[in-house]
């Protein structure tokens, strides 16, 4: 990590910790960092990554093979929570941008640049590697065997799209916060009903957009104090109401119980994104607010807050490169003759710690090499 030894370098971690303002909501940063960590661990440890008969890398999960494992996805499917805290952070950033006289275009460009630099770096490096492999060694393109390297980036595309429309969603929120969020939920419900009734999956694009914009709007409701004005019952109402809706939608309704795709099931909740994920976003916000007082006390400790700062300072680099780290380890173990199991057998379970440690070592090197593109030096 660069140090603050010169005016042109980025602040050190300790300096960033010292500069944390007293009014900062540390829970937002902690949840955002935790979301990235959970995604990485899920892909490394809880995926049955293997090579198919066609030579492609595939990474299903064992949810369908383990009884009641779908319950874990109600906690570990963290994308809704990420969009919620993203809404909080983006509204806070907009408020500062607005005070400084900035424009909507400048706000969107600045936020997207923070996402785009790590993604562009990864894409460029992989393009060079892929070209060299094809020209120099006659290797097949990564687009033929290793799309799993890039699949997680669809999340950044969805998040980037939500940021792109943030000036308009913030304006709608400030005008009519409650009706705006309720309207998005109505769009999700209506489009889902039309998709199931007509079989036209284009309605799924509508629900996908409305769910993620709606989760982002939840962050606005948190940031502007709307939920705080409900008093102590607010978090309970969110957690209980969202949880009840989630149970009804998945147990009595047409939606799968798992919040991630399950091998062999035709219908999933993530893409197209369904009303069940909208209910999950409400539930997760309620749970976050319920644990927030204890979490804030924990984050007041310097050591805990420093860990959060480290994760957030490298979050997009970690996210962009964690699948590359996994692919490097897969290539190495296959080179020495070890084949990856295609089902969660005893060997697969025993090796779970290995698939945490080995990719972690590789990722550490990748982060050291590429984090500079996430947090470029500036005066």
Image (cartoon, rainbow, N blue to C red):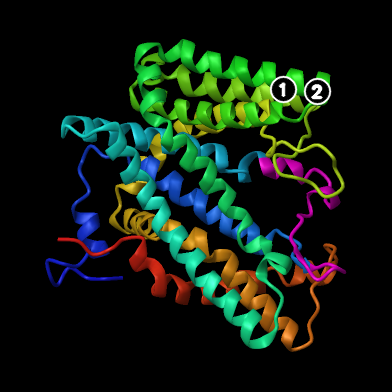
Q: Secondary structure at mark 1?
A: helix
Q: Residue furthest front?
A: 135
Q: Height in image: 326 above or below 183?
A: below
Q: Which residue is mark 2?
A: 196
Residue 71 drawn in magenta: yes
Q: Mark 2, residues whose alpha carbon is within 10 Å: few (<14), some, or many (≥20)?
A: few
Q: Is residue 3 left or right of residue 282?
A: left
Specify whether 311 is left or right of 280. left
Q: Quadrant of residue 107?
A: top left
Question: Which of 69/159 is in front?
Answer: 159
Tell me: 59 left or right of 84: right
Tell me where residue 167 sits by quadrant: top left
What residue is rendered at 81% in x and 25% in y?
Answer: 254
**Numbered disc 2: secondary structure:** helix
* Residue at position x 55%, y 37% in the image: 80
- Image coordinates of residue 26 in percent, x first then y, are 33, 43
Seen from the viewer's position, the closer of residues 218 and 271 is 271
Residue 270 in picture, x, y percent from top left: 68, 39
Q: Is residue 42 above or below residue 108?
A: below
Name the residue: 68% across, 43% down: 73
Q: Which residue is mark 1?
A: 192
Tags 2 and 1 touching, CB below 8 Å: yes
Residue 65 in view here? yes
- The magenta-colored residue range is 51-73
Question: Whole-Å distance between the Cαs marked 2 and 1?
Answer: 6 Å
**Residue 101 among magenta residues:** no
Image quadrant holding the C terminus, namely bottom left
Residue ID at (74%, 82%): 334
Q: Nearer the viewer, residue 200 or 276?
A: 200
């Amino acid at each position: 990590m660069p140090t603050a030894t010169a005016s042109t370098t980025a602040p050190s971690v300790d300096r960033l910790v010292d500069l944390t303002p007293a009014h900062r909501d540390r829970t937002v940063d902690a949840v955002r960092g935790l979301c990235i960590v959970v995604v990485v661990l899920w892909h490394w440890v809880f995926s049955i990554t293997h090579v198919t008969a066609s030579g492609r890398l595939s990474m299903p999960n064992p949810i369908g093979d383990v009884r009641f494992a779908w319950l874990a996805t109600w906690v570990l499917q963290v994308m809704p929570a990420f969009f919620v805290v993203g809404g909080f952070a983006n509204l806070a950033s907009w408020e500062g941008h607005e005070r400084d006289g900035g424009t909507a275009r400048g706000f969107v460009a600045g936020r997207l640049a923070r996402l785009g630099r790590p993604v562009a770096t990864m894409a460029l490096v992989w393009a060079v590697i892929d070209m060299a492999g094809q020209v120099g060694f006659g290797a097949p393109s990564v687009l033929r065997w290793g799309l799993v390297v890039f699949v997680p980036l669809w999340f950044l595309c969805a998040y980037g799209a939500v940021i792109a429309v943030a000036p308009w969603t913030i304006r709608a929120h400030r005008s009519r916060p409650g009706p705006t969020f309720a309207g998005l939920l109505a769009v999700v419900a209506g489009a889902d009903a039309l998709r199931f009734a007509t079989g036209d999956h284009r309605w799924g694009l509508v629900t996908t957009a409305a769910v993620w914009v709606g989760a982002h709007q939840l962050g606005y409701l948190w940031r502007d104090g709307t939920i705080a004005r409900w008093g102590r019952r607010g978090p309970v109402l969110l957690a209980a109401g969202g949880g009840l809706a989630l149970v009804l939608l998945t147990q009595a309704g047409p939606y799968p119980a798992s919040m991630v795709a399950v091998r062999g099931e035709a219908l999933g909740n993530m893409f197209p994104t369904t009303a069940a994920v909208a209910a999950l976003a409400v539930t997760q916000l309620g749970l976050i607010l319920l644990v927030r007082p204890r979490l804030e006390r924990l984050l007041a400790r310097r050591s805990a807050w420093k860990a959060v700062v480290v994760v957030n300072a490298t979050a997009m680099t970690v996210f962009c490169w964690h699948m590359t780290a996994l692919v490097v380890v897969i290539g190495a173990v296959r080179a020495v003759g070890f084949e990856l199991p295609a089902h969660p057998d005893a060997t697969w379970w025993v090796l779970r710690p290995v698939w945490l440690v080995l990719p972690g070592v590789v990722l550490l090197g990748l982060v050291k090499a590429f984090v500079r593109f996430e947090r470029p030096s500036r005066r």
